[in-house]
Amino acid sequence: MKIIKNIKLKIDEEEVLRYQGCHNNKLKKVNKTIMKITREEIERGYNLFESKGIYSPVKIKQISFSSRRVDLKNGFSLNFSNSIINLLKGTSYLILGVVTIGDSLENKVSEFFTQGEYPRAVALDAVGTVVVSSLSNYMRSLVCQDAKEQDLQTTRYLSPGYGDWDVSQQKNIFQIIPADKIGVKLTESYLMVPQKSLSWIIGIGKNIVTPYKEEGHSCKICQAENCQFRKIF
């Protein structure tokens, strides 16, 4: 198990604008006031987020394709859809990870909403989304680099609630990995607290049938083609 804290991250202005709905061809036509507020909230964001992450490998006992279940050596199991269970063919370990940027930023967002500062609230919330996503990418890159150094392959990452993996599996992840060590808890409705947190798994093995390729992490694999946050490729 590894815990990493105080990771330095650069906040991507274009991504923050995209999460405010200013995406694709609209980026060049952003209102000057929105741009000013966005840049101010990006600067504020640097003083509000506290990056923390935890991840741990768990050996797979067996993969049951008929019941779409992965049994782990530690006695826990994870259930998947048909499409996801097929992605895990050839894996021998699962890496489970959780990252968070703490609750200071989201508390400030709530304060802005209460004060009626809606443009600032939306901009700062977008900053938080971009930061936690960047943090998650960074942590997963560490996992993939470790695997590469051991001559192992990796699958693309998977998160409960995204695609066709049921969000209820979040509970299983939190039973396996001690996310409370980085201050993250799970509600009865499977939401993480602080809200700007992400969880995921990555499969690792010698002969993965569908190994990770860079495009596997992009909007190319998402079926929500009309999503306002979608990137064009």
Image (tube, grey):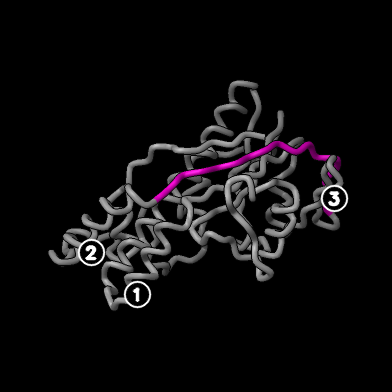
**Circle nearer the viewer, 1 or 2:** 1
Residue type pointed to by label 2: Lys
Residue at x-position 59% and y-position 21%: 149
From the viewer's side, name the closer residue of 42 and 155: 42
Where residue 91 appears, x then y in whole percent?
73, 38
Residue nearer the viewer, 199 or 107: 107
Q: Give the residue type that dot 3 points to.
A: Ser
Disc 3 versus disc 1: nearer the observer: 1
Q: Whole-percent x and y of residue 182? A: 58, 46
SS of the residue under disc 2: helix
Label 1 SS: helix
The residue pinned by badge 2 equals 26
User: What residue is drawn where x is 64% and y is 31%?
Assistant: 153
Specify the label residue 64 is tagged with. 3
The part of the chain drawn in magenta is: 49-65
State which quarter of the image contains the N terminus: top right
**What residue sits 54% from the left and 47% below the top?**
99
Q: Quadrant of residue 55?
A: top right
Is 62 inside the magenta-drawn segment? Answer: yes
* C-alpha gap between disc 3 and disc 2: 47 Å
Of the two numbered discs 3 and 1 on the same chain, state the one appearing first in sequence: 3
Query: Mark 1 Cα within 10 Å, few/some/many (few <14, many 20+)?
Result: some
Residue 183 left/right relative to 114: right
Q: Amino acid at mark 1?
A: Phe
Q: Is residue 46 left or right of residue 6?
A: left
